[in-house]
Amino acid sequence: MNSRYLTPLTILSLAWLSACTPTRVSNQVPIDSPAQWQHAPNAQTAETADLKTWWQGFNDPLLNELIDKALATNHDLKIATARVREANAMVTVAEAALYPSLDFSLSGGREKRIDRIVGVPGGQGIKLITPTADAVSGGLAARWEIDLFGGRHLEAEAAAAQAEGRKEGLHATLVGLLAQVATNYLELRGVQQRIGVLQKNIDLQRERLRTLQVFLKAGLANEADIARQQTLLQGTEATLPGLANAEQNLIHRLGVLLGEPPESLGSRLAAVGPLPKQAPAMPNLLPADLLAQRPDLRLAQTEVSAAAASLGSARADLYPKLVLSASGGVGALAVGGFPSLADSVYALGSGLSAPIFNAGRIRAHITAADARLDQVAANYEKTFLLALEDVENAFVAHRSARDSFGQLTEAEASAEKAYRLVNALYRRGAGDYLAVLDAQRSKLAVSDERAKAETAVSVAMVSLYRAFGGGWTISSSESATDKASIR
């Protein structure tokens, strides 16, 4: 065969071999997924709030505004976004190694050296001189490492997997941010509601103390009754600073989450508002859906893919490497006293290298990469178990808070009924005013517990959506790909 056709065919054959990537390692980790949740509500319907905008189910305009602000200005999101850009740039760096490199060079200079003495004939014989040399050269140089066994391809795949991991890290930051903003806002409203109940209780106990003091003057009470009531009042008042401190801390935390100074939201959120009366629908996803929806699981999968690619790349170091090179250009040389020389220059070359002895370095690198793959595979399985635990715990917390809220709502209604009956007897002259105050105090104590339980129900719903990875959505094709590793 003509040699001019041999070289292109050889290069094409080598490129085809490189595409086979014989050192590739599988990145599939089989996951055993339960068929259903153990603690999900029995009456769960097919309806569920939009995972991407689940917080809108609370129907609270201020909460929606705070989350929109956080999405635009939160610093953790900015950091995660910058990390994604950095990782994407590194993918380009890794992929660049798959292609030939072409460099331009231009150099020139003048030199005069003692070791370059030239004898020049003269009238009195040979004259020794050190000529000045002017040299200029320039041209192009190309180099291409043929990826015979896929090592460079696998390095690029590892970089791409790491970039995907950064993207999933961004999703995880987003999910956590949404849950933090909603949780802190709901807890703030719950604390403010409890402060209102506590203030009413304090006013009521002060009224009871004044009544007892009147009764003491009339001989209807004693000093012990006064002391007990003062103790009760002071203990109740001591609770107020703690709740006020919690209120300010929650406002400050929301400010930081929104990328603002802690005190920036004080004037807006200090105004007491009610807890949202509406809540999002119960999430209705299967355990297997977590693999596609939860960012931490998707991140763990990218770590497996990157480790598998790195292992394949390490194995490729056992095999030969072929490098093709070519360069060409022009050069000129002028030496004082002699005619100048100018001509074109070129060079074509190829090199083949293979490891023979390296004191076990390559094998150790392969062993380390294999151990890394085992680590991330085990971490992927563990992360899935932790995700199942997270969801089940959220289901249990929501059911417990909902049951407590229902019972305390009934208890509050009973306390309200008892207060109305005692008050009616007092107004007819058949009851004691202190009994009226005691019935009202009991009602307020139950109201405080009911407010805590109501807050817990809302916060538990937020935890459910966080456990399901709510706050972003994926395409159906991505979901199908992620489920491929489930058995």
Image (cartoon, rainbow, N blue to C red):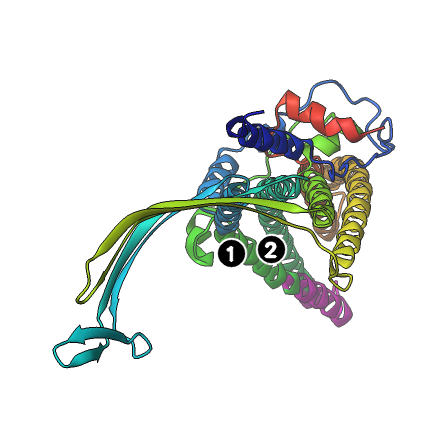
Which residue ends up furthest to the bottom in the rendered image? 124
Q: Which residues are magenta?
A: 213-237
Direction from residue 479 to residue 145 in the image, left or right: left
Direction from residue 210 to residue 261 in the image, left or right: left
Against 123, residue 293 (above or below) is above
Percent coordinates x, y for residue 56 in the rendering: 56, 30
Kindly tell me whether residue 164 is visible in this rendering.
yes
Q: Disc 1 marks which residue?
A: 252
Residue positioned 51% across, 56% down in the render? 252
Against 433, residue 135 (above or below) is below
Which residue ends up furthest to the left in the rendered image? 123
Mark found first going from the N terminus, 1 or 2 = 2
Q: Disc 2 marks which residue?
A: 203
**Dot 1, how many residues are within 10 Å of its Cα: few (below 14), some (14-19), or many (20+)?**
many
Q: Amino acid at mark 1?
A: His
Q: Residue 261 versus residue 265: which sits nearer the camera? A: 261
**Dot 2, how many residues are within 10 Å of its Cα: few (below 14), some (14-19), or many (20+)?**
few
